[in-house]
Image: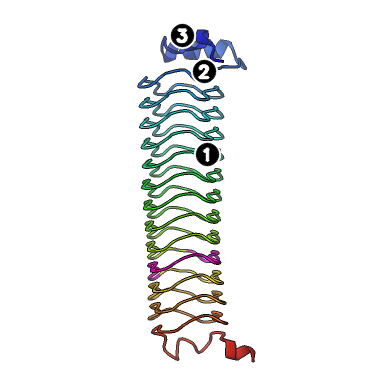
Amino acid sequence: MANYDHLALLKQGSDRWHAWRSHHPGQILDLSEVRLAGVYFKDTDLSHINFRGADLSQTVLTAANLQAADLSHANLSRSELSHTQLQGAEFVGADLSYAQLSHANLSHANLISANLRGVTLRDADVSHANLVGVDLQDAYLERANFNQATLNRANLRGTYLVSAHLNQAVFDHASLVGTQLVSASLYGAIFRQATLSSANLVRVYGSEADFQQADLFQADLRWAVLQRSQFQQADLTQANLRGADLRGANFRGACLRRANLEDAKLDRADFTQADLSDTNLNPTQLRYTMMESDRS
């Protein structure tokens, strides 16, 4: 239950609040379920506070410190959180829809099942965060750092991830239909059984990425660097792989029917039991690949 003495202190302004906190280190602060919609908290130290279920919608929290705060099930929709420190914060089931989080630091934050629809995370640090089951549809994540983040079963339909850093991130069973991933870095990222139909992966760097059993129907992978990546049993029907670097990639059992492989680099690629019907491969491209006939 919220401590209304703490709430009264907070409303007296940041100078009074910071002075009180400096004289009460380690004080347990409970502001759960309070209503603070539209309040101005720029540069305020709100770290380690319990905000569970609080209404912080349309609140200005620019450059605030919310490290290790508990914001589970809180309403932060349309709030201003640019340059905010949110490392290790709890956002389980929170509503951050259409919030502004450019340059924010959410590394190691827990965002399981959070609503991030339409959020802006441009240049934000979301590395090592737990985003299992989050809704990031139509979010703007240009140049954001999602290295080693977990996004299993996340909804990223129509999300803008141009030049984002997704190295060793996990997207198992995630939906990335129509997602913009141009020039993103996907080194070692995992997309097992993910849906990437009609996604734009032009010029991605994804060496050693894992797309096993992924749906890449009509995906655009022109000039992508995907050396040694795993595509076993993936659906690449009508995918555009023109000029892609697929050297050493594993396509065992994959479907590449009507895929565009013009000028793709395929040395040491494994196409055992792959469906290559109606592709535009030429014999020179297959010279150093592994096919079913090579195993007989």
Q: Nearer the viewer, residue 255 or 291?
A: 255
Give residue 241's position: percent from left, percent from top. Answer: 40, 74
Residue underneath mark 1: 111
Name the residue at 43% across, 51% down.
156
> Counting other residues with Cα less than 10 Å from the Cα at mark 1, is it few (<14), some (14-19), or many (20 or more)?
many
Task: Say which element carries label 2.
Answer: loop
Task: Say which element carries label 3.
Answer: helix
Q: Pick whichever of labels 1 and 3 is earlier in the sequence.
A: 3
Name the residue at 46% across, 60% down.
195
Q: Pick whichever of labels 2 and 1 is earlier in the sequence.
A: 2
* Image quarter (top left, top right, bottom left or bottom right) of the N terminus: top right
Q: Amino acid at mark 2?
A: Leu
Give residue 230's position: percent from left, percent from top. Answer: 56, 69
* Image quarter (top left, top right, bottom left or bottom right) of the C terminus: bottom right
Q: CA distance from mark 2 to mark 1?
A: 20 Å
The prevailing secondary structure element of the residues shown in magenta is: loop
Give residue 78's position: percent from left, percent from top. Answer: 35, 32
Q: Amino acid at mark 1?
A: Leu
In the image, which residues are magenta?
206-223
Residue underneath mark 3: 8
